[in-house]
Image (spheres, rainbow, N blue to C red):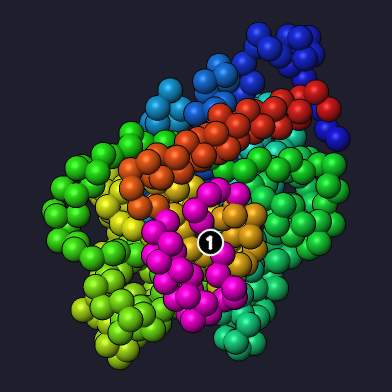
Amino acid sequence: MRIVSLKGGDDQMRGEKMRVLIVSDVSAEEVHGGAERMLVHHIRALSEQGNEVTVLTRQPDPNAALKIALENSVVEHRLPYAGDRGPAGLKQLKKGAQSWWKEHVDRFDIVVAEQPFTIWALLQAGCDLPRLQVCHSFAFEEYASRHGRSGGFRHRLAAAAMRRLEKKVYRSADRFIVLSHFMQNRLISFFQISSELITIAPGGVDIPEPFSSDNRDQLRASLQWRGPVIITLRNLVIRTGVDLLVEAAAILKNDLPDLQWCVIGRGELLESLQAQAKQLGVSDIVEFAGYLSESEVKKRMFAADLFMLPTRDLEGFGLVTLEANACGLPVVATPVTANKEVVPSLPLNLLADDVSAASLAVGVYKMLDEKRGEGEASRVALQKAVETRYAWHYHDDAFVQSVKALVRS
């Protein structure tokens, strides 16, 4: 284990700032999903401890600024990045990291890495500082779920190359933090990481102010929702299984003719999902709302009756489960990966029997029949359960201690 010197050891450390570089593949400027949310909370947790925090990421788009100011005097630097996800993109990141690191080589004590690609470029540039690696999921697995398993030799080769890159990144880290036992086991299995180096710190959620039944009725009226509404918030890609939701809508249409469905999110499968809904005769009851602001998402969470998480594979934790429950909204989910840990840990939620539209439809029918989540009292009780088990401070405390462990080791 490498040692970072902060003059005076652990006692001195408590009164002296750590200079922490957080390296990420996403920007903290705007929250689009779980990766950005975790990044923002990690920045905040370290900043509130009095540490000097700097962020290094890649340009969100080629026209984005190369340097921006965040809250708490945190600066986010961006490596030039045109968006290529192949060798050309890695080459561009590597070149940018070499230039950036020459100017900043003596400015940090330790590194926290959130995803694999920007930190890979920084390692190639010569950064060898002690590092905590955050592991939400594996990029090579997500790529393979989209392309590699049935996409021909070229895609399988790309997935294998990504796995080699991730192996190099993860095997060179000093400590790890994951959100679930599922991801801990994945790290051990794929990259032979010692369990002693891995801290499991489940994700957290902010608890919004509860809406009264009157408020909820007003929201539903403004959205023109009359019957029960099933909602989801997903990237529209294969692994998130939104096609299963559309099929479940078709299965339940005759038995529950008043049931409506709302899909929030964007992605490469939008057009095919819309075509699927039309083919199955449910385009009139399945709304594709696209990307919405956080306030608009919360409005629909409060107004809906159930949340569906139809994941096919690779749910490293599923922050969206907590976000739905924090709005008093019960979740029905497929029994895969970290869903099996998170979903049953809170009341009112339900795991389907298997990964199929039929099982999800049965789950929805059962939950509506049992009136799960109906009534202001049950929604408030669900919010309280989330707050008791998954308040952000539990994750933040474990995260900060993992960073400090780099100093003490």
Residue 284 image position (x, y, % from top left): 21, 79
Q: Is residue 132 above or below residue 14?
A: below
Which kind of residue does numbered mark 1 sit on? Leu
Which residue is rendered at x = 48% and y = 63% of the image? Answer: 332
Q: Which residues are magenta?
A: 345-372
Which residue is rendered at x = 33% and y = 34% of the image? Answer: 209
Residue 168 image position (x, y, % from top left): 75, 56
Q: Is residue 342 above or below residue 401?
A: below
Q: Image check: 93 left or right of 166?
A: left
Residue 83 image position (x, y, % from top left): 44, 62
Q: Residue furthest bottom?
A: 279
Q: Nearer the viewer, residue 18 or 249?
A: 249
Q: Is residue 240 above or below residue 174?
A: below
Q: Residue furthest front?
A: 370
Residue topped by disc 1: 350
Q: Can I make out residue 208 in this image?
A: yes
Q: Is residue 368 rendered magenta in the image? A: yes
